[in-house]
Image (tube, rainbow, N blue to C red):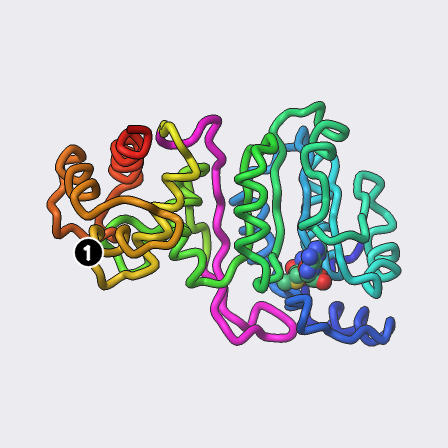
Amino acid sequence: MEKLANPQKTIEIIQKNNFHFQKRYGQNFLIDPHVLEKIVTASQITPDDFVLEVGPGIGTLTQYLAEAAREVVAVEIDRDLIPILEETLGEYENVTVLNQDILKVDVAALAQEKNGGRPIKVIGNLPYYITTPIVMGLLESRVPLESITVMVQKEVGLRMQASPGTKDYGALSLAVQYYAEPYLAANVPPNCFIPRPGVGSAVIRLACRETPAVTVKDEKLLFSIIHASFGQRRKTLVNGLRNAPGLDFTKEQIEEALRRTGLSETVRGETLTLAQFAYLADELGKMADK
Ligand code: SAM
């Protein structure tokens, strides 16, 4: 099958099918073969792999995945794209298209059915309006995942892989890095898509950990503390945690927990590593138990 990844072929398919782009579905289709090759290389697909693709569009990336993997399931919400995908992917016997919302798909059942419960690879040029629910939903679900390799808005990619003390570091960095090791594989400019998005893009690979990066007694408390620390960025950690809804610690308790973690009372949340947040959460947890 002729590749769709060029502007002429993409426009031809769109016009022939009288397809109208839906902004609300974050539809920006890739038209640059180099970028598609980068995604395939970054995702480290082997002929043995089962791949779940998020949002195939007209099937541009799906063609590459079908040629590299054993089997692909592609989940597309827009029913107007389904007849187009039947045509563009008709020759690939190892591809199944599901007309569903990715946020409602039972990925664990899919991994069980298609991959015997072994870790799967998730790949996609994501609809940017739901990047965080898709990525965090997958990571938190504890579905067996080997990696997630996705196109995201560039600033979101930078936040996912940011280190403590940098301007991009925040709750998303810590949440992603708790479950996975991020690697920014490529920057992608707007002219690689039709229509051009208003923002820069990046391909990020998240290599999923078998167990979280740190061990903590109360995961929920850890993430409440992380969210509270970044909710009020300019405040010290003591003030951020004291004023946070849902957390019920006194100034003295927080200061004592910070001392036990080996941190100053004037420290700001944005300088703490994940391991320090975990230690702090355990210390505060002990105080709550008393
Ligand atoms: N993979 C194609 C490409 O690279 O050319 C299209 C990528 S486009 C950025 C995102 C795709 O995700 C669109 O086809 C859009 O319709 C689809 N999409 C949006 N929301 C979705 C959802 N909740 N579940 C599944 N697919 C969705």
Q: Is residue 233 left or right of residue 157?
A: left
Q: Is residue 87 left or right of residue 241?
A: right
* Residue 287 on image: x %, y %: 26, 32
Q: Quadrant of residue 217?
A: top left
**Residue farthest to the front, as pictured:** 290
For label 1, the crowd category at 10 Å Cα-Cα, with few meaning under 14, some 14 to 19 and many 20 or more, is some
* Residue 203 on image: x %, y %: 50, 54
Magenta residues, start to end:
187-214
Q: Is residue 163 left or right of residue 181?
A: left
Q: Amino acid at mark 1?
A: Thr
**In the rendered structure, does residue 202 fall within the stretch colored magenta?**
yes
* Residue 8 on image: x %, y %: 73, 72
Q: Is residue 171 left or right of residue 167?
A: right
- Viewer-proximal residue among 48 and 176: 176
Q: Is residue 207 above or below residue 191?
A: above
Query: Which quadrant does the C terminus fall into?
Result: top left
Give the residue displayed 49% in from the left and 72% down from the top. Answer: 199
Q: Is residue 220 above or below residue 247?
A: above
Give the residue displayed 29% in from the left and 49% down from the top. Answer: 163
Q: Quadrant of residue 46?
A: top right
* Residue 167 on image: x %, y %: 28, 61
Q: Identify residue for label 1.
A: 236
Which quarter holds ligand 1? Answer: bottom right
Give the residue displayed 38% in from the left and 32% down from the top. Answer: 213
**In the rendered structure, does residue 71 fall within the stretch colored magenta?**
no
Q: How many marks?
A: 1
Q: Quadrant of residue 43?
A: top right
Instruction: State the SS at label 1.
Output: loop
- Viewer-proximal residue among 290 and 277: 290
Tell whether circle 1 marks a residue whose Cβ is less than 8 angstroms from ligand 1: no
Give the residue displayed 19% in from the left and 37% down from the top. Answer: 257
